[in-house]
Amino acid sequence: MRAARMYGYHQPWRLEEVPVPEIGADDVLVKVAATGICRSDFQLADGYFEDAVPQHFPITPGHEIAGHVARVGVAVPGAAGLSDGDMVVVDPSWGDGTCRQCHEGNEQLCTGDGGWVGFGPPGGFAEYLAVHYRHLIGIPASSGQRPEYFAPLTDAGLTTYRAMKKLQAAGKLGPGRAVAVSGIGGLGGYAVQYAKLLGGGATVVGFDRADDKLAVARDHGADYVINTRDKTAREVGDELAMRTGRDNVDAVLDCTGALESLQLGAALLAPEGALVQVGLMGTRVELPLFPFVGGERSYTGSFWGNYNDLTEVLALADAGMIKHSITTLRLDDINDGVDALGRGDVVGRQVVVFA
């Protein structure tokens, strides 16, 4: 089979012929149909995760995966509901099943020997993938949607869904409230939609530095959008006031992680407001101490999502409640796609589609 493999940091990925993986008794062989290109794929190649997630090269990246069942292991239970030809998505967090986080259902936070597909365990930039059956979720044949629309939901769609649920659970959404989504990239386009779906009538505002990305936010349901390029927090607050009647927001979902974006979100946060962080473009967080303590504001990290979160996202997609902004490309063009992400040239999500 063909696979895109990474042999070291700061190097182009190599397209190679490698053996189709063998499967164990509890595994399923998945014929990959579509794999999303995430900014973290660029960061993986760029060495961003070198200390946190050390790699033993070569590896095959790719963690947003949809495909079809090609072969089922002999010990896969019938109750798993997996048959040859079924469309499936891969739950990307492969916990070891023994730590407290795994027992709570949060395998993406595994503190044992678990990992994430494409960050060590072979990933989806290959024609076939071996997956333990419990990390697969079947897609109903009646959905009528193509694999390239389901693949990004396993990260871009999942990560922002979990984060928005945290804001909802914290009571920061609802009538009379305002929520800002900062960074309308692959994640932010989904985040805007979840703000409308889970917001209970909250006003939804999209922040970005590019008009073409703000157009996606508007198309996906944002009530207002503001281009923040070269603007101070006060200037953005003034634009907020012109549009919403107030110069602050009750909740911020930051999809970038850039220092400037975090500082803007913190400056615009109302008393008792909450900032939830999912983006990882930067390396540190700097927040004004007294406003956060004196105003009982809060900052929370949110990482990926769990199996149950993903089933909820897929149910929304199956019901036609999620829009997508997808650009497809071939495996041969994988390096071009990763480089485009590094430059910030991508609107929406790029997805590698296999024939």
Image: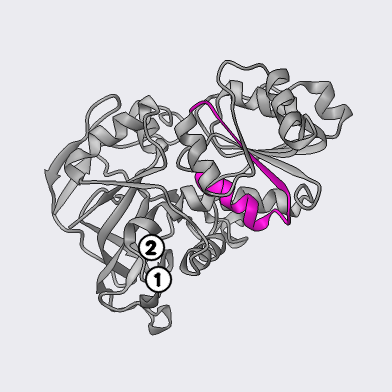
Please say if 266 is above or below 94.
above
Extreme-left residue of the structure: 17
Give me the residue at 24% from left, 26% from top: 11
* Residue 139, disc: 1
Image location of residue 186, percent across then percent down: 45, 42
Color scheme of the displayed model: one colour
Q: Quadrant of the N terminus?
A: bottom left
Image location of residue 5, percent across then percent down: 22, 40
Q: Label 2 near label 1: C-beta < 8 Å?
A: yes
Sequence-wise first label, 1 or 2: 2
* Residue 110 in sight in this render: no
Q: Quadrant of the C terminus?
A: bottom left
Please say if 132 is above or below 110.
below
Residue 121: within the magenta? no
Q: Is residue 21 left or right of residue 180?
A: left
Give me the residue at 79% from left, 34% from top: 245
Residue range in magenta is 188-210
Q: Is residue 262 left or right of residue 30?
A: right
Give me the residue at 29% from left, 55% from top: 34
Extreme-front residue of the structure: 242
Extreme-bottom residue of the structure: 78
**Which residue is tagged 2?**
89
Q: Which amino acid type is marked by label 1?
A: Ile
Please say if 85 is above or below 114.
below
Label 2 Cα neighbours within 10 Å, binned few <14 / some 14-19 / many ≥20 = many
Extreme-right residue of the structure: 294
Work out whether residue 214 or residue 126 is closer to the camera in this orientation and state it. Answer: 214
Q: Which amino acid type is marked by label 2?
A: Val
Residue 197: within the magenta? yes
* Residue 327 in sight in this render: yes
